Amino acid sequence: MGITETKQLLGEFGLTPNKALGQNFLCDESAVARILDAADADGRCALEIGPGLGALTLELAKRAKKLAAVEIDAALVRVLERRLSGVQNVRLLHSDFLKLDLDELKAGFFGGEAFCVVANLPYYVTTPICMALLSGGHSILSMTLMLQKEAAERFFAPPSSRVYGPLTVLAQHGYAVEKLLSLSPAAYYPAPEVDSVVIRLVKKESAAYLSALPPLLQAAFSMRRKTLFNNLKPLFLSREALLNALSACEIDPGARAEALPAEAFARLAGYMEESGER
């Protein structure tokens, strides 16, 4: 869907892009084609977050076994309802994604099957949405995410860098992350003030889900200037239990969280789950 069709559709429904919701509609047709191919939704269940005017949605519906599209804006839901009229394999959900029960969606509409995710994420909700996707153990096969360039840097950040944090560790532990393409402001209507990036995350078969990892990261990065030992004390029953865990995982108690690679956090989370030593 190009810029002309985007403007026509907005005009037909009497709509103006909602700045408060960060609405910038993708209208670069070559980018749409690349994103659809990267999503690898053919024959699979798929979840689209922020479908907007449906630039990706209709073609995703043709490829996917089942598609759930979650849109927060009631006005855009009305547009999508008309555009998806007669399409049988799509469930359109008028909801704030952060209030959606993904386990219920998977068990119900997806029949318990693993699924892929496609999302165009406004900057103001990028972190909470990504954290929800990465930390819940939801059997997500892949994620194809459109986000601001600055936000994308966090997925690739090395230890000790300014933007290295829980999101980085969760992404790098569970997924192989690659940059798919860059998008200039001209790829959107209205044009944002910043460049955007499309990244793709593919689930690592070797990476087990660790329920202890999200709370471990939250504690470890809670106060970045403090040592790992001081930040993790609330998670353990005693000082000795914490020291034993760090020693078993070959982690320096005096290190700061930002200096540890993702695999070190995964070792510690795995140790905590296996030993029950907390």
Image (cartoon, helix red, strand yellow):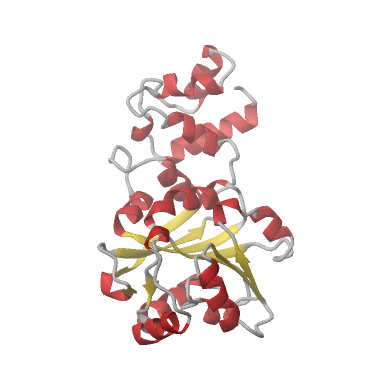
Query: Relative to 122, does residue 242 appear above or below in the rendering?
Result: above
Residue at image position (55%, 23%) is: 235
Query: Relative to 157, does residue 268 appear above or below in the rendering?
Result: above
Q: On the image, which quarter does residue 270 sit in?
A: top right
Quadrant of image for the C terminus = top right
Residue 8 at x, y percent in the picture? 40, 86
Quadrant of image for the N terminus = bottom left
Residue 191 at x, y percent in the picture? 29, 70
Residue 57 at x, y percent in the picture? 53, 76
Residue at image position (43%, 45%) is: 167
153 sits left or right of 230 in the view:
left
Q: Is residue 60 visible?
A: no
Query: Relative to 249, does residue 42 appear above or below in the rendering?
Result: below
Furthest toward the front, the residue is 14
Query: Relative to 98, does residue 166 appear above or below in the rendering?
Result: above
Residue at image position (48%, 21%) is: 247
Q: Is residue 224 visible?
A: yes
Residue 4 at x, y percent in the picture? 35, 86
- Closer to the camera, 179 or 250? 179
- Closer to the camera, 192 or 269? 192
Number of residue marks: 0
- Closer to the camera, 204 or 119? 119
Residue at image position (30%, 54%) is: 150
